[in-house]
Amino acid sequence: MEYNTQRDILKIPDYGRNVVKLIEQCKTLPTREERTQMANTIVDVMARVNPQAKERTDFRHTLWDHMMFIANYELDVDSPYPIKREEPIQMHPKRITRRDSAIRYRHYGRALEDMITAVADMPESDERTQLTQQIANTMKRQYLQWNRDSVDDDLIREQLAELSDGRLTLPEDFMFHDSQEFLAAMAATQAKSEQKKKKKKKKK
């Protein structure tokens, strides 16, 4: 079990930990075009998670600044705005009324459900297809973080269809990323986090 006290501190808590995971997943995509497409969708998710951002006239510029800051400016994408390498002013959110609908699968989180909804609302296109496949692999990765023993690709397919109300489906020949790749990446991230903690203890 992973507790919040054992995790890295969120650079901008307003967006939650699942947005951070999506940004980290975006970094791993093989092409700049795929990363840029996913980055645009992440910005849409950030706007849903933090709706008071829309009160600003330059809200999308602000969201891009926040995303790049959270990514430590390591997100290699085509940004529609010049990148400001400075700590952004955080938007302290107003109290938001609690949603009545419960999260159907807690290990995926609200942000991923919002992303599924955003992609499902898009018209049919190659971009929509690619984002659907990226979401499927993100779901597999987060499922493995919750249960590292095993994951059934067919189960991920079923849950993607369920969360999108049947609007997002994967082709029969779609191949998920290998579970061992995800587990190795998670182990490397954990080892890096532990190294940082050791360095902080030595400094103290």
Image: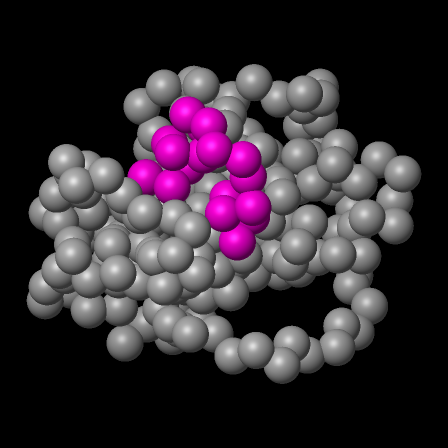
Residue ID at (89%, 38%): 57
Q: Position of residue 52 (x, y in %)?
A: 80, 57
Residue 8 visible in the current orientation: no
Vertical placement of 133 versus 148: above or below? above
Viewer-proximal residue, 160 or 183? 160
Residue ID at (38%, 72%): 105
Vertical placement of 170 versus 1: above or below? above
Instruction: Work out which quarter of the rendered image holds the N terminus and state it.
Output: bottom left
Residue ID at (44%, 46%): 22
Left or right: residue 52 compared with residue 75: right
Residue ID at (43%, 18%): 32
Q: Position of residue 135 (x, y in %)?
A: 37, 46
Q: Is residue 44 magenta?
A: no
Over which residues does the magenta segment extend? Answer: 117-133
Left or right: residue 181 compared with residue 81: left
Q: Is residue 120 magenta?
A: yes
Left or right: residue 80 compared with residue 144: right
Q: Position of residue 161 (x, y in %)?
A: 34, 57
Viewer-proximal residue, 191 or 108? 108
Vertical placement of 76 versus 188: above or below? above
The image quadrant that residue 134 belongs to is top left
Vertical placement of 136 versus 161: above or below? above
